[in-house]
Amino acid sequence: MVGVTLAGMVAASFTVTTASYAAEDEHTGDARSARTVEVVGKLPGDHNPLMGHKFGADGFGFVDDGRVYMYLTNDTQGYAPDPETGISPQINYGDIDQITLISSTDLVNWTDHGEIPVAGPDGVAPFTNNSWAPGMAKQTVDGEEKYFLYYANGGGSSNVITGESPLGPWTSERTSTLIDGRTPGADEVAWKFDPAPLVDEDGEAYLYFGGGPAATDMPDEERFNNPKNIRVIELGDDMVSTTGTAAVVDAPVAFEAAQVFRRGDMYYLSYSSHFGGPDFGGSQIPAPGYPGGGQIGYMMSDDPMSWPKESYAGVMFPNQSEFFGTGTGGNNHQSVFEYEGRYYFSYHAPTLNKRINGDSAQGYRSAHLQELRFADDGAVEQVVGDYAGVDQVRDFDPYRQFEAETLGWTKGIATERIADGSAEFGGSAPNLVVTDVQDGDWTGLSSVAFGEDGAAAVTARAMPQQAGGAIEVRLDAPDGPLAGTIEIDGPAGEWTEATASLEDAVGTHDVFFRYVGPSGELFDVDTIEFAAEGASLEVSVTAAARCVAGTAVVTARVANDSDLVAAVTVESPFGTQAAAAIGPGSTASYAFRTRAGEAAAGEIAIGASAAAPGGSATASAIAPYDGIACG
């Protein structure tokens, strides 16, 4: 994980601002917003780097329930460019105690879920100081499905926290680090970091970790070619402990960043190679076929615990500087994951940092993806890095309420967490908004499928910061044809929903939201939703009475059967409740306590409203329930 960078001295014109942030009361997400990158760091049409508005390194791809989650070292945390020169001090890994999380279902448009406050005094695991190089796994423990986020606590140890979902909320089941000097078999490993889990098909779980200088009691040639600085150990059934003794991974010219995936009956271990020097027996030429400095080598084995040097198979990825040029050298950190029948290789390169400052970079890295392909004999075809990236897996579906911080491309915006839960991912999931929005800034989505009939309207949930702001919806380019304009009206500092009619939003297009208005910050944007031509509001409700601890309770379940976001009011003989938004195809449940031991038969009535093409739509429904006596 440790970065090796080339210093640069030339700065391009650049402006940076820092959005405000609020402290967190619970360990559910990030506590600090991203710095605002004013340049276009990810060019429209390109799919690398994954994000253009913040940095992220050491990406670990994890697939769950049809979605790819990318866990990243939060390189943005220490990013502080000079307002005049645009150059930030060199990255300081000792400042990093958060993990950045993004996700996608198409590998091009990524939702920013913010930062997980892992370490430090306010972190989930305050007994650790840093959080680098994350790894992620899912396992059922004692009948309960859990998620486990592993991370490096600096170079000396590794740890794990536990989540209820890939997005959290997060807790620590440990009070001390998982991997450290007490770990059997790891005493000769200098850097007990870079933990990467593997849960095998039979449920057995393993953790790969380690790196750094080779032991000094080996001959210089062995220290260089076979440093034996990586280990694998079995994880306990609880996933937060280890069992047995760590085994040596004899990866040639190894430095760090071991990660394993399975394909058929074969296991593949990839890792980052070292650059030589006194820590590895001095400057030498690698043995024939072994990787050069700063490359990603790989091994193949039929046993996840057995990695002799003979299992070395070649170079998976050359140094990234071969593809991205001056200022992008150094070591790397990779992962491989399978998604919908294809394999993908994640890596990092300081490409956004370079685009900000010309040919200079200060070590702030950005996540990239390429497809990983295989020869007929199972060997890996060497990966070629580029800005084009991977093909989009599927078109983007606009006919739902989605987070505005779902981003294909950006210019000039930041993201920031707010207290409300996510409309798309649920109330317990972190919710960010697009913020620091000023005239001329924009965000974009790749390959949005409006269909043959097209979209008639678009609705944005936004908070005005001043009067006169608007969102232009443009097709195919930031200055492309104008399909409609959303006027963001309403009191400053209050959330409002604004709707605009659309023209010519038919077929499949890249879509850009261009923000216009007077000088200064215009508004924050929470969610966006398109409405199809001819969309109408349809809701339904079911009701029942039941006994809870001797008290009669009337329950109602409301279903939104339309393509619109519905605001719903639920009325009962025992009171009224309201929901600000129920998404398309979603349901919501309500409970009314009678404060009595019985309830007579009655009915639940609901009223719903939604922004629709050409105006608004309303709907209503009634559901009866039987009486009940709780004896």
Image (cartoon, rainbow, N blue to C red):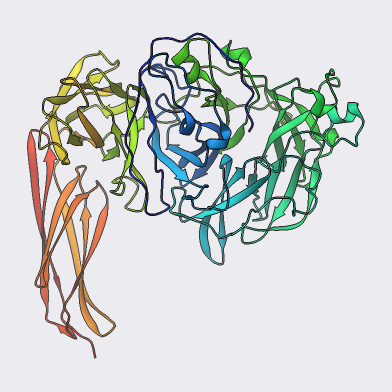
- Say which quarter of the image contains residue 616: top left
Q: Quadrant of the C terminus?
A: bottom left
Residue farthest toward the right in the current orientation of the protein: 219
- Residue 46: give x, y in percent of width and height: 44, 18
| Residue shown at the point (59%, 15%) measured from the top left | 7
**Left or right, residue 288 beside residue 48:** right
- Residue 206: give x, y in percent of width and height: 69, 50
Q: Identify whether 166 is placed above or below 140.
A: above
Q: Nearer the viewer, residue 185 or 529?
A: 185
Q: Is residue 332 visible?
A: yes
Q: Identify whether 607 is placed above or below 63.
A: below
| Residue shown at the point (52%, 57%) measured from the top left | 146
**Left or right, residue 89 beside residue 276:** left
Q: How many marks?
A: 0
Residue farthest toward the bottom in the current orientation of the protein: 631
Q: Is residue 343 visible?
A: no
**Left or right, residue 265 beside residue 388:** right
**Left or right, residue 445 beside residue 116:** left
Q: Nearer the viewer, residue 131 or 63?
A: 131
Q: Identify whether 4 is placed above or below 610.
A: above
- Say which quarter of the image contains residue 496: top left
- Residue 502: give x, y in percent of width and height: 15, 25
- Residue 597: give x, y in percent of width and height: 19, 86
Q: Quadrant of the N terminus?
A: top right
